[in-house]
Each structure stands twice: as structure tokens, then as C-alpha cells.
Image (cartoon, helix red, strand yellow):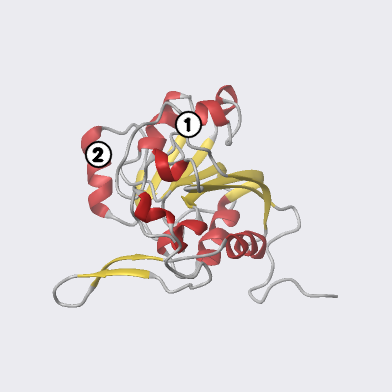
Amino acid sequence: MWGPEGLDEVEAELLGPPEDLKGKDVLEIGAGAAQCSRWLTAQGARPVALDISHRQLQHALRIGSAFPLVCADAGALPFADASFDLACSAYGALPFVADPVLVLREVRRVLRPGGRFVFSVTHPVRWAFPDEPGPEGLSVSASYFDRTPYVEQDEEGRAVYVEHHRTVGDRVRDVVAAGLRLVDLVEPEWPAWNTSEWGGWSPLRGNLIPGTAIFVCERSEMGAPPAGGWGRD
């Protein structure tokens, strides 16, 4: 599943037709308990599940995994260049880093030429609305252009949860700056069969404003741009 709407990869084929996944080396970034990697294994792929949280990977281990689990920072992937055919991330890693281009550059580095990276995040427009499932969540309460991150702190003032806001334009520019090519931007509509409501997600909101943005990218053949971006010459 790419997000709370329930868009299934079997239906969407954003990574490619399921039959084409067989034998492919796939990196799941921000894997959590590695649900996506288990699905990929069932399709005959060879996934590697990466997460910075040791506890999350312990969950994956308890559930059972017939693939490698790697505890590492997505901004410093511990893999050689051109190690993977595909990479994916469903609500993992990218919303939680201050410098997403660093992660995207690393993904590009470990992808083979023509390799695809698909990642989903909360749709940026949601940041302008309260995180409520009912009618109170339908009125704009903040500036869409305010990039101030959302931070939760413990009793001692330490950050325990940080999520960064990027506009749609920011996300597109990040992809390009990392040397990736944006192939598609998918905004799943809320399906009639999904009656679930949890957190700020609900059929009411889902039928009116997008909740998930899925970026489908491929490794550009032009090579990665320098740290300052492409020149004008």
C-alpha cells in the first residue's frame, strides 16, 4: 500500500508489472517493520530493508524476514554504487530529514542506470489544514508556504518526533537537484470501499483534498549535478 487511501502496488504498478519484479534487487528506505519488503519477496524480488530505527527492524525480525535488514541513515547509504534495480519508500525517511536532496542523491548513487525510485509522502497541501478527520479538518488554518517543521517534544524538551514540510514545488526541485527524472506524480483519490477513519484520515477529507503524493522517479542518464546545482553554460 502506498498510503492510507489504500492504493495497492498490484493495481498501481508504479515499480513496474509484478512479473517484472522477479529477480530484481530492491532497496526499501525507511522500511519500518518491512511490510513492503515482504510483499516484494513474495513477487520474487530480492529486497533489502533499511531503517534508522533499530526498534522498527526488531519488529521486522519478530514478524519474520527472509531478506537483509540494515540499520543505517538514508543520507549515508552503506551500499556500493549501482547496487539496486529499484528503490521504494512508503511514507519512510524523506518526511523526517531536513535535507531530502542528500537522501535523493544517495538513492540515485545506489541505483543502476535507468533504475526507478518511487516514494510516497503526506500530500503537501495537507499542511495547510488541521490534522482532524471531521469538518474541522476542512478549513485552512496555516500557510501552505510555511516550512516550519512539526516537532513533538518530551517532558525534558527533547525532540522525539520531527516532520518537515516541503511544498509540491520543493519536492519536484529536490528530485531534479539530485539528478533524478520525475516520471509521474500520483495523487490517489479516496476509493468508495475505504470507510476507515484514523488520525486525520477519513473519507470526508479524502474525497475533497488529496492526502498522499507519490513521486515516481528514474535515475537520469545525465549524471548527478554538483552540490550547487546545474550550471547555465
Q: Which residue is mark 1?
A: 191
- The extreme left residue here reads 155
**Disc on the earlier residue, 1 or 2:** 2
Is there any visible trace of residue 74 in the rendered image? no
- The extreme top residue here reads 19
> Residue 33 versus residue 82: which sits nearer the camera?
33
Q: Residue at x 56, y 44 (%)?
A: 187
**Relative to 26, residue 141 above or below:** below
Q: Amino acid at mark 2?
A: Leu
Image x and y of residue 63, in percent:
24, 34
Q: Which residue is mark 2?
A: 61
Mark 1 is surrounded, within 10 Å at the Cα level, by few (under 14), some (14 to 19) or many (20 or more) other residues, namely: few
Q: Amino acid at mark 1?
A: Pro
Q: Residue at x 37, y 57 (%)?
A: 72
Q: Residue at x 48, y 40 (%)?
A: 207
For discs 1 and 2, the disc positioned in front in the rendered view: 1
Instruction: Give the Cα separation between the discs numbered 1 and 2.
Output: 33 Å
